[in-house]
Image (cartoon, rainbow, N blue to C red):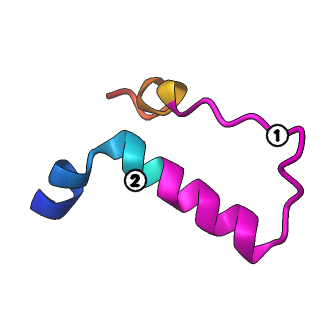
Amino acid sequence: MDDIYQLGLTNLFVEIGLLVTNKFKIETKYAHLDSTSFPAIWGI
């Protein structure tokens, strides 16, 4: 938990998003990732 806190939730979700798009070869030419909305989704 301390490592997650130090990394920051926004950075964590961005990293996860990048890993997923790379793993599944999702075209990102026109994709938009608004990581500012993640805390609202999770109720933080």
Q: In this view, does 14 lie to the left or right of 39?
A: right
Against 39, residue 11 (above or below) is below
**Quarter of the image where the C terminus is located:** top left
Q: Distance between the residues labelled 1 and 2?
A: 19 Å
Depth order, front residue of 35/39: 35
- Residue carrying label 2: 12
Depth order, front residue of 44/13: 13
Residue at image position (67%, 37%) is 33
- Residue carrying label 1: 31
Disc 2 crowd rating (10 Å Cα; few below 14, some 14-19, many 20+) is some
Disc 1 crowd rating (10 Å Cα; few below 14, some 14-19, many 20+) is few
Q: Is mark 1 on a helix, strand or loop?
A: loop
Residue at image position (73%, 76%) is 23
Residue at image position (82%, 40%) is 31
- Residue 42 on image: x %, y %: 43, 34
Q: Is residue 20 left or right of residue 9?
A: right
Against 11, residue 15 (above or below) is below
- Residue 30 on image: x %, y %: 89, 38
- The outermost residue toward the front is 29
* Residue 20 part of the magenta segment: yes
